Image (cartoon, rainbow, N blue to C red):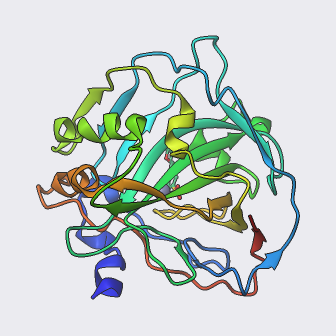
Amino acid sequence: AEQASGSYNYDQQGKDWEGTCQDGLQQSPIALSSSQAIVTSARRIAFYNYDETLQSPLVMTNNGHTANIVLPPTRNGQRPYINGGLLPGTFEAQSAHFHWGSSSSKGSEHTINDNRYDVEIHIVHKNLRYSDKTVAEASEYWDGLAVLGVMLRAVNRVLSPHLGLIGIFNQLPQIAQYGSSTNLTGRYSAQQLLASVNTNHFYSYNGSLTTPDCAESVTWTVFGEAANLPRRHISKFWDLQDSREQSLVNNYRAIQDINDRPVYYIPK
Ligand code: BO1
Ligand code: ZN
């Protein structure tokens, strides 16, 4: 049942969701496995301006396939950016969005040691080399984009709940309808999207966008540690609607073949 709901049927979506995925050998997501990955001691990922307050307004939109947050520059006029790890350059944060399941199924795109988590946060970055290009244009290059993946686990009780993400999730009912947007209230930094996971422990590989056209332009970094969030906040995703007023749930793509790609693993 999980496989069926996860094999995202693009044909059932509205016209904003047209397109098909290319049939390449470097598609995403994949099943990440610590025993099959190449253990390496890569550099840490270095985060810049991640703890700086982002300019307002910070807008979250229901675009029919996810809740998308466009990341503005910080109050000092710079964007959050990253380098190090296995990244082929320096990459500036552009947007963030989420993949989720439903009340009866989990929704992360990648799996880690056969575990599928409840939510996967994607923070989309664009290579500084392509600063005069859009995200869509940069996706035509193998080194165009870098996406950070953060796993969330729905739990009944959380000792120290993650207030930044909870603030965002509390505003999800305001974008229940396709095409609606809301200004996030309160102060946010890009850091809050990392949910306090240990960013020195991650998987990295070359892959693709997980939505059409699935361009093979992404250096993926998926953190190995999941963060716990109250289920009552995660469940707010399940009330969003797509362009046909259908329930917007299970918006994750099926697992793709690794095809002999090296997957690197930086253990704790
Ligand atoms: S994902 O992180 O692999 N799920 C992913 C999938 C598709 C996009 C980004 C990340 N697409 C891009 C579009 C851009 C758009 C941007 C907004 O999303 O190519 O045109 O500006 O987030
Ligand atoms: Zn995504």
Q: Quadrant of the C terminus?
A: bottom right
Q: Quadrant of residue 92?
A: top right
Q: Viewer-proximal residue, 107 or 213? A: 107
Task: Give the residue drawn at x 22%, y 56%.
Answer: 235
Task: Give the residue drawn at x 21%, y 36%.
Answer: 180
In percent of width and height, residue 90 lies at 79, 40
**Lateral position of residue 9 relative to residue 126, left or right:** left
How many marks the image carries: the answer is 0
**Lateral position of residue 156 relative to residue 38, left or right:** left
Task: Give the residue drawn at x 51%, y 62%.
Answer: 213
Indicate whether 235 appears above or below 95.
below
Q: Residue furthest front?
A: 159
In percent of width and height, residue 20 lies at 44, 69
In percent of width and height, residue 79 lies at 64, 25
Task: Give the residue drawn at x 26%, y 28%.
Answer: 182
Indicate whether 113 appears above or below 100.
below
Q: Residue furthest top?
A: 76
Q: Quadrant of the N terminus?
A: bottom left
In percent of width and height, residue 67 lies at 33, 46
Indicate whether 159 appears above or below 250.
above
